[in-house]
Image: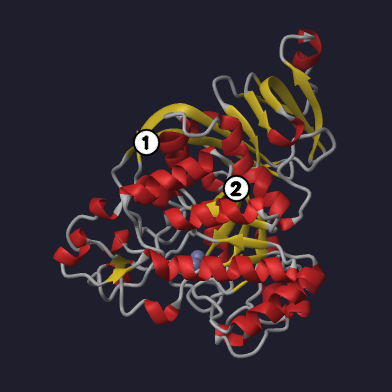
């Protein structure tokens, strides 16, 4: 079946398109991109088997790519599975996601990566790419079988959940990543400096009796990893940056010619530690919610394109786990189904970033970092497309999430921006009610 997306505002950073274009999909690929109202008859000439989608008032972007998702499969399938995670991704506008390796067992061999890839292919909804762990069992002692995982299709390595504290070992991993032409996705946290911290280290948090995580816990490892990337020439991507000094160091490293990119998560540009109500562990994540100063620096970094990517760090946990005290609940919140409205509400509408920058940070740049032929709406490319109505106003309702994880601090929040349709490989994998035929 052909799909003709009519009347939308096409946002395609690679081809420098931001304007009114119709998009015609055939055989799973972008077949034609046509300026609107140039040849009305032809664009109206839908054949027998053509679904016409009215996208007027909507953004039409290359399918969103999330570099940072936890699927919990295998090992923690009471929190999420490949299938429910993929459903949540499609619902949130994502056509490709990168799954982090902190599963049980850890993703440290090729056959484990194949398990996830095969499961996602069976479901056939969106593209799931499984990142490989840097060390065996994520124990930080010896390197995992990186080559076998890359052979099985891993697009990157990461120790997300912790840092590889042994710099010598991490340097070896970076050299291997460089030789295999894959990026290293870095979680930056000096574990010896955490000292039982659960929230940001500031006066308000201390007044509530909660132990703090200082900015330096992150910054020390950001500095180290940039230096290691400089020495090895590896492609370094910094996960979930939360501090103002992270932004400053990424800026300096880029000026220095280091191959570094950086991501910001929606919760880190939306909330500060001061927004945490009483004992609600749905506000507990790693790195923690920081101060207004940090949030402003992250926003400025996104505006200036120092920060390249918006990723969710979707980290589902069970209700029981998140009902525990701040001290005892696990770190992490879900994000796949709130990333689009938070980005529209907090960044695009207030003019922090343009809609074209949003498409770059949520699709084109992630594709470039992974080295995959996506994030591009040129004729002939695979038809991964996301349609978003930026004007729809609604209230986030965790009960409408497809994810098994309902652990969000955004339940009940008023937002703008709704995903109307997600198309993956020319197939409609999600459509909002008003888009259903
Ligand atoms: N971000 C989190 O708070 N939690 C993540 C781990 C991680 O991303 O470091 C998780 O796996 O739950
Ligand atoms: Zn992490
Ligand atoms: Zn993570």
Residue 223's quadrant in the figure? Answer: bottom right
Work out whether mark 1 precedes mark 2 in sequence or the reverse, and give the earlier one. 2
Q: Relative to residue 35, is residue 274 drawn left or right?
A: left
Residue at 41% in and 61% down: 405
Quarter of the image where one finds residue 182: bottom right
Circle 1 or circle 2, nearest the eye: 2
Q: Is residue 34 left or right of residue 102?
A: right
Q: Are marks 1 and 2 in contact (CB under 8 Å)?
A: no
Q: Quadrant of the N terminus?
A: top right
Q: Which image quarter is the C terminus in?
A: top right
- Could you tell whether 231 is left or right of 270 in the image? right
Q: Is mark 1 within 8 Å of ligand 1?
A: no
What residue do we see at 77% from left, 9% from top? 38
Rendered location of residue 151, percent (x, y): 80, 73
- Ligand 2 within 8 A of label 2's CB? no
At a point 72% along the width and 50% down the height, the residue shown is 368
Q: Which residue is mark 1?
A: 415
Res. 84 visible in picture: yes
Q: Nearer the viewer, residue 358 or 387?
A: 358
Measure the alpha-carbon separation of dots 1 and 2: 23 Å
For label 1, the SS is: strand
At label 2, counting other C-alpha atoms closer than 10 Å, the crowd grade (few under 14, some 14-19, many 20 or more) is many
């Amino acid at each position: 079946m052909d799909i003709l997306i009519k009347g939308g505002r096409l946002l395609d950073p690679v081809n420098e398109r931001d304007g009114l274009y119709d998009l015609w999909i055939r055989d799973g690929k972008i077949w034609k991109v046509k300026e609107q109202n140039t040849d009305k008859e032809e664009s109206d000439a839908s054949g027998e088997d053509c679904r016409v989608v009215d996208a007027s008032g909507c953004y039409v972007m290359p399918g969103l790519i999330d570099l940072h998702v936890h699927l919990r499969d295998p090992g923690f399938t009471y929190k999420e599975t490949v299938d429910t995670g993929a459903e949540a991704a499609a619902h949130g506008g994502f056509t490709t996601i990168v799954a982090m390796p902190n599963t049980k067992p850890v993703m440290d061999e090729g056959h484990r990566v194949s398990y996830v890839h095969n499961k996602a292919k069976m479901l056939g909804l969106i593209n799931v790419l499984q990142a490989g762990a840097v060390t065996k069992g994520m124990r930080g002692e010896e390197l995992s079988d990186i080559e076998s995982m890359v052979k099985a299709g891993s697009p990157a390595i990461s120790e997300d959940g912790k840092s590889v504290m042994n710099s010598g070992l991490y340097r070896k991993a970076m050299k291997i990543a460089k030789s295999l032409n894959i990026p290293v996705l870095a979680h930056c946290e000096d574990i010896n400096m955490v000292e039982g911290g659960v929230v940001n280290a500031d006066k308000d948090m201390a007044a509530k009796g909660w132990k703090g995580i200082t900015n330096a816990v992150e910054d020390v490892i950001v500095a180290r990893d940039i230096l290691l990337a400089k020495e090895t020439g590896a492609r370094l991507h910094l996960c979930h940056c939360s501090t103002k000094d992270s932004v400053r160091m990424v800026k300096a490293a880029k000026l220095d010619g280091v191959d570094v990119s950086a991501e910001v998560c929606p919760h880190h540009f939306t909330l500060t530690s001061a927004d945490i109500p009483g004992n609600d562990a749905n506000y507990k994540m790693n790195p923690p919610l920081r101060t207004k100063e940090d949030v402003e620096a992250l926003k400025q970094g996104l505006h200036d394109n120092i920060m390249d990517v918006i990723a969710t760090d979707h980290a589902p946990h069970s209700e029981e786990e998140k009902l525990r005290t701040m001290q005892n609940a696990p770190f992490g919140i879900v994000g796949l189904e709130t990333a689009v409205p938070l980005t529209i509400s907090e960044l695009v509408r207030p003019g922090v970033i343009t809609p074209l920058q949003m498409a770059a940070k949520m699709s084109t740049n992630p594709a470039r970092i992974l080295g995959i032929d996506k994030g591009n709406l040129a004729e002939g490319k695979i038809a991964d497309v996301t349609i978003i109505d930026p004007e729809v106003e609604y209230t986030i309702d965790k009960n409408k999430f497809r994810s098994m994880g309902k652990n969000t601090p955004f339940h009940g929040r008023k937002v703008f921006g709704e995903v109307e349709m997600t198309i993956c490989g020319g197939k409609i994998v999600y459509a909002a009610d008003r888009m259903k035929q």
